[in-house]
Image (tube, rainbow, N blue to C red):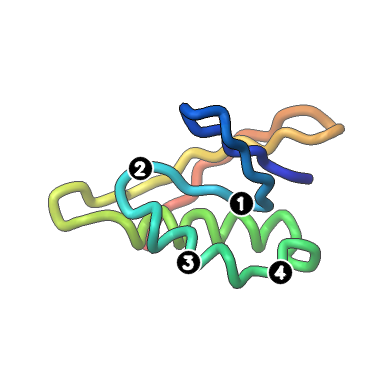
Amino acid sequence: LSIYLLDPSGHYSKWKACAIGHGSDDAMKRLENVDFETIGKNGAVDLAVEVISSSATSQNKIKEVEIAIIDKNGIERMAKSVK
């Protein structure tokens, strides 16, 4: 599985994970050190919730993250509470 990030100039990069928007620099630093070959689906979901919630500020507290996993078996939707 790969994600291709395309910027407005047409340059693209291949990634295993990607973060955009507020806090994306810190999120990408965290994601760069993850072994996505061994983390598994549940580990990836937990990591996503952790990274998203860590970028929240006191003005935009996150209580729940909605996630969709798309794979060869279809679409699985879930909501995870943020601790």
Work out whether residue 75 or residue 13 is closer to the camera in this orientation and state it: 13
Mark 1 and mark 4: Cα distance apart in space: 11 Å
Of labels 2 and 4, earlier in sequence is 2
What residue is shown at x 49% (from left), y 67% (from top)? 30
Q: Is residue 16 left or right of residue 31?
A: right
Q: Residues within 10 Å of mark 3 (few under 14, many from 20)?
A: few
Quarter of the image for residue 13 reads top right
Mark 3 and mark 4: Cα distance apart in space: 13 Å
Q: Where is residue 19? Give x, y as percent.
A: 48, 48
Of labels 3 and 1, earlier in sequence is 1
Callout 1, which amino acid? Ala
Work out whether residue 51 or residue 9 is closer to the camera in this orientation and state it: 9
Mark 2 and mark 4: Cα distance apart in space: 23 Å
Q: Which residue is mark 1?
A: 17
Nearer to us: label 3 or label 4: 3
Q: Which residue is mark 3?
A: 29
Callout 2, which amino acid? Gly
Q: Which residue is mark 4?
A: 35
Q: Where is residue 71? Give x, y as percent.
A: 79, 35
Q: Residues within 10 Å of mark 2 (few under 14, many from 20)?
A: few
Work out whether residue 5 or residue 53 is closer to the camera in this orientation and state it: 5
What residue is shown at x 39% (from left), y 63% (from top)? 26
What residue is shown at x 68% (from left), y 52% (from top)? 16
Q: Residue 21 — which label?
A: 2
Quarter of the image for the C terminus: give it. bottom left
Mark 2 and mark 3: Cα distance apart in space: 14 Å
Mark 1 and mark 2: Cα distance apart in space: 14 Å
Q: Residues within 10 Å of mark 1 (few under 14, many from 20)?
A: some
